[in-house]
């Protein structure tokens, strides 16, 4: 069965086509016409979407115009795990989709999903399939931009990983504070979860995956398309349930 998954994020929209569990092709969507052509080329039979950014209604209409059944994932959607979040109506469905992917990839392990995008989110799924929530912090670009916009003189450097954690210029000091600060945060967060839950599988996704992966001490499983994989699993769960 060919399925279409769409992840509308804060900064970009990604679409992927799956054949059952196998990701076949992935593209960025910049305009509804892009999605129209993608659907024409790939001919999916079912579609699933989650959105934390804008544009969901326009893209949903494109899918429906092709007469493809669409599952729009919301907090009211049934998931193959128990959600213990106290305010599910405020929970980003990209976070839930990452958890669905973790459950599919590592069904018998405690999993910590780290999504390093506009924001950095941490979400935990127990080996008993209980989602207990997590945390949200500013992403790399957001930290650099905040220091630039909330001060008078600090610059806004291009995001590149510094060679030295001791910055010898203001640009390098900003990059060191942000980049090594985020790496230390991630490593500290993993240690905190390990102390509470024992052995766990760490999964890393999001736009800054490649930049951060080499600076994380623990054994991680980097999956840049984790949210799309999880969306597909949520869709298959509903289709197979009938």
Image (spheres, rainbow, N blue to C red):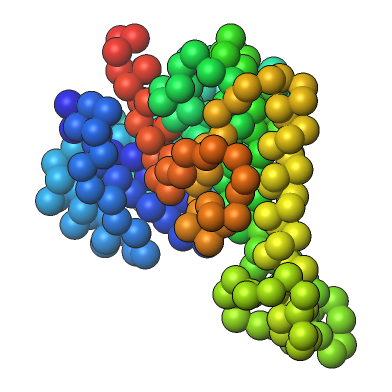
**Which of the pair 198/28 is nearer the observer?**
198
Q: Is residue 227 visible?
A: no
Please give the name of the residue rendered at 28% of the width and 51% of the height, measured from the top-left corner: 26
Q: Is residue 174 left or right of residue 73?
A: right
Picture quarter with the C terminus: top left
* Position of residue 96 measured from the top left corner of the image (x, y, whole percent): 55, 31
Rendered location of residue 187, percent (x, y):
70, 45
Position of 93 with respect to 150 (left or right) is: left
Q: Is residue 159 above or below residue 126?
A: below
Q: Can residue 180 be seen in this snapshot? A: yes
The image quadrant that residue 86 belongs to is: top right
Residue displayed at 37% across by 64% down: 30
Quadrant housing the N terminus: top left
Q: Is residue 198 left or right of residue 12?
A: right
Where in the figure is residue 236, as x and y percent of width and height? 32, 22
Q: Is residue 140 above or below residue 213?
A: below
The x, y position of residue 45, in whole percent, is 19, 32
| Above-or-below relation of 115 to 33 | above
* Position above or below: 167 against 110: below
The residue at 53%/55% (across/down) is 214
Residue 136's quadrant in the figure?
top right
**Residue at (62, 75) in percent of width and height:** 163
Report the label total: 0
């Amino acid at each position: 069965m060919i399925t279409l998954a769409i992840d509308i994020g804060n900064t970009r929209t990604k679409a992927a086509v799956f054949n059952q569990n196998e990701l076949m092709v992935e593209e960025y969507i910049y305009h509804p016409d892009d999605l129209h052509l993608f659907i024409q080329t790939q001919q999916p039979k079912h579609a699933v979407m989650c959105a934390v950014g804008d544009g969901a209604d326009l893209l949903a209409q494109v899918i429906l115009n092709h007469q493809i059944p669409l599952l729009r994932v919301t907090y009211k959607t049934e998931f193959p795990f128990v959600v213990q979040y106290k305010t599910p109506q405020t929970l980003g469905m990209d976070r839930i989709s990452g958890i669905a992917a973790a459950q599919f990839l590592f069904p018998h392990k405690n999993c910590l999903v780290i999504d390093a995008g506009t924001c950095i989110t941490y979400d935990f799924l127990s080996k008993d399939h209980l989602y207990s929530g997590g945390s949200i912090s500013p992403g790399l670009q957001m930290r650099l931009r905040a220091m630039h916009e909330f001060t008078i003189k600090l610059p806004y450097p291009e995001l590149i990983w510094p060679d030295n954690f001791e910055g010898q210029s203001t640009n390098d000091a900003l990059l060191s504070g942000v980049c090594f600060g985020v790496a230390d945060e991630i490593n500290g967060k993993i240690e905190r979860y390990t102390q509470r839950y024992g052995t766990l599988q760490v999964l890393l996704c999001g736009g800054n995956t490649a930049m951060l992966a080499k600076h994380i001490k623990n054994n991680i499983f980097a999956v840049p398309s984790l949210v799309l994989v999880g969306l597909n699993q949520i869709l298959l769960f509903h289709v197979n349930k009938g």
